[in-house]
Image: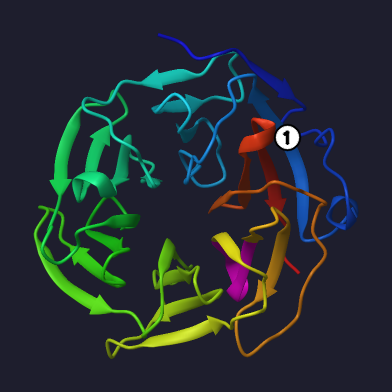
Amino acid sequence: MRAAALVLAGTLLAGCAGVGGAGAGGGPLVPLATFGGADAVRLGLRYPTEAAGNLSAVFAYDARSRRIVALDPFRSEAEVVKVPDLVPVTDLWYTGSETLYLAEPTRSRVRRIDRRGRVERVYSAPAELPRPVAVAVEGAGRRVWVADGAFARIGRFDALGMLLETRELPPGAAPTALALDGQGRLLVLDGRRGAVLRAGPDGGWETVLGPGRVPDPVAFAALPGGWLAVAGRDGALHLAEQEPGRRRLPVPALTGVRDLWFSGMVLVAARPLEGEVVLLQWRGP
């Protein structure tokens, strides 16, 4: 089974058609390529690269047709990953070792599957994490973090799927996305308060992006040097330095961004309403 044909606009070496703004002329983010198709990718919550700096596939959850697809910018079609008993997915993480992790809150689980859709392991603790909404994975699965939307806590599983610990988020927080920074530290997007939190070594939380810095953030990605790429609910892309810095940098004039992923030196932005995935090269401030 194949998805609708993809249309590649530009290449990894050429400028990106239709994406302009301050970042296109020597800013920290330089557009590389845009690809997408008539079958719009909607609510695909993670778009990782297969290897750092070497984009060969972008995985996405297509909520409209409820399927996982592998989008290859060098081929004309998207390959459907056939996952058994697939229910609505709120997050997707790709480790780069042919393994995907799917957050399925309606079944109180995160499933690890291979690229062919075969289920390899299930991470589930319904009593402690009844509604897993986001997932982050260190390396090839040595640590698996799961954000629970019911109790506003983070759980950590080992490689065998055993829950090792849970960590409560600050009162009033609502986790909506997870990321790992360049030092392997866990970052949590608090969508309710519009903040980014970082797990501290003592079990507490540090605020690295204060409330109000980006209006109503819906997605984020950790960039080198302590920078964050953040998408607001209005779909605009922002760059912000983690606390205590407060600088902002110019970015390409993107709209409709609903998810972000960073690997190597490439930032991948999902624009589901336009049915597009945009690639941008990070050159630093």
> Is residue 229 found inside the magenta-colored segment of the image?
yes
Q: Is residue 161 left or right of residue 109?
A: left
Q: Main secondary structure of the magenta part?
A: strand
Residue 114 place in picture, x, y as percent: 26, 32
Q: Which residue is mark 1?
A: 33
Residue found at x 36% / y 85%: 171
Residue 164 place in picture, x, y as percent: 12, 69
Which residues, given as a range, are shown in magenta?
221-230
Neighbours of disc 1 within 10 Å: few (<14), some (14-19), many (20+): many
Residue 99 place in picture, x, y as percent: 30, 38
Q: Residue furthest top?
A: 1
Residue found at x 24% / y 52%: 141
Amino acid at dot 1: Ala
> Is residue 133 found inside the magenta-colored segment of the image?
no
Of residues 187 and 214, which is closer to you in this image? 214
Q: Is residue 280 left or right of residue 123?
A: right
